[in-house]
Image (cartoon, rainbow, N blue to C red):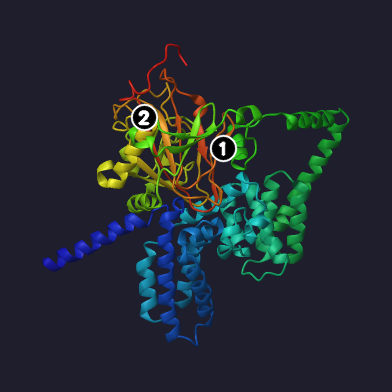
Amino acid sequence: MMETRSIWCVLLISSLLHNCFAHNDFYTSIGQMTDLLFMEKDLVTSLKDYIRAEEGKLQQVKHWVEKMETLTATATYDPEGFLGHPVNAFKLMKRLNTEWGEVEDLVLKDMSDGFISNLTIQRQYFPSDEDQAGAAKALLRLQDTYKLETHAISTGNLPGMAGNLPYKSTLTVEDCFELGKIAYSEADYYHTELWMTQALRQLDEGEESSIDAVTVLDYLSYSIYQQGELEKALEQTKRLLKLDPAHQRANGNLKYFEYQLAKQRKAESERSGTGEKEKKQEKREVDGNEDFLTEKGKYEQLCRGEGIRLTPRKQSRLFCRFFNNNKHPFYILGPVKQEDEWDRPRIVRFHNVISEQEMEKIKELAKPRLRRATISNPVTGVLETANYRISKRRATVHDPQTGQLTTAQYRVSKSAWLAAYEHPVVDRINQRIEDITGLDVKTAEELQVANYGVGGQYEPHFDFGRKDEPDAFKELGTGNRIATWLFYMSDVAAGGATVFPEVGAAVKPMKGTAVFWYNLFPSGEGDYSTRHAACPVLMGNKWVSNKWIHERGQEFRRRCLLKAD
């Protein structure tokens, strides 16, 4: 009986471990991905033991280990710095999800028990297909947001690389092909074309690969056709058939593309007589000159450092000062440094308001409990949950088409919540926020700590509840979010700015500083100009913590004015 109970306990623990780690969305948090590097290093050590036993038979495996040993030694010396390069993060997902499986197959036939046992045990903690696809999509998102060439990403020459040269990494033909395949599976033919073209370019340059040009051209020609470029698709299909004249699908496509191209040319010829072609060209020129950008366009533009509407007149209204919050006793002798970042909405930055030791303690407390973030849906503006404690669970949103709950994809980060009673550092930070802002934090939400993952971002959203969502914070009973306090707990080599698309403001992360703004006017009305976003992290690791301060308790601290404002 006792033996049976023990077996059931072991099975239960194994099941719990599997549930905790197998679907952990590793790619959404750089902080948690560092554990994977040490796990990978352990696998390399285990594989080395096997090589010593099978040295003569497994030269191919030995070559793999030597390559991986060098990589993991570099990576684990500074895990967060290494994973700050998005190519390294993507390749880690790809190695553990795909390539280690190939190594397992290679050694499975003749091997000692040690390596396969270790690999089997560790496999339950490996990233999933979702992680690998998520890391790939993050690279594509970075490519679009920062207008990066595929060649620049493939060679690892990204903005912000100056201090990260030891971690520079390149993409192989297989890597480029994998990115193209993931884009293809999402019917994203634009990125499929870009990455299949890059894979083909590297093959043409003589790079050795298990992927042949025929396979690449098969994907490339079809993705080009799907974008309506018949002549170009036909050209690539003919190239494919020169390499493999018997390729059945390419032969079928060749006839179809030629037929479609003939129809297209005939239709264009008929339209040219009516002047329709000239009219369409004129329309395209007018459309191309329109001074109009979607919100996403503005957001991405600000992320690149473009489109910032900081005029000389506006600049003249922004100052730096020593701030004591109306002679607060604690800050009379030691005022804080306050810098104006923007005038309307007024965004201020406080310098040196959190120490290195405090930041490390906050990260230490948060890291074990990081979970995929629950947030406000940028499309509907509706909060996924009014109860901020529920945010410790995996993020879900309501899909209006299917009626099902689905994981939120527009925030790539993980967050944790820290209460004041959990550690004196948290309590001290809360008190500091109250002293500097003059607002009561007793009714504020717990301190939220977020770590952004590969290409980590948070698309445009409001922090406050709008009129069409009156029950947004009903369960809290503390009113709307009156203000936002945001600590930056790491420097970010490139990207990661907090931008306000409505007004054209961009605030760059600066370790040890905090930014503050009011979400509501004194009248209690929401300030829609505070709609903001976190830009994708291009290079580096982004840690932030924020405090959402609520209306209750501020009645005599931020009074209503005589005029509605």
In this view, the residue farthest toward the left is 1
Please give the label number shown on residue 398: none
Judged by depth in the image, the label closer to the viewer, 2 or 1, is 2
Q: Amino acid at mark 1?
A: Ala
User: Label 2's element?
Assistant: loop
- The residue labelled by disc 1 is 506
In this view, the residue farthest toward the top is 562
Q: Residues within 10 Å of mark 1 (few under 14, many from 20)?
A: many
Q: Quadrant of the N terminus?
A: bottom left
In this view, the residue farthest toward the right is 273
Residue 402, position in %: x, y? 44, 36
- Total marks shown come to 2
Q: Amino acid at mark 2?
A: Gly
In the image shown, does 379 or 450 lie closer to the viewer? 450
Write the residue at 47% across / 58% down: 80
Q: Is residue 249 visible?
A: no
Residue 451, position in %: x, y? 43, 49
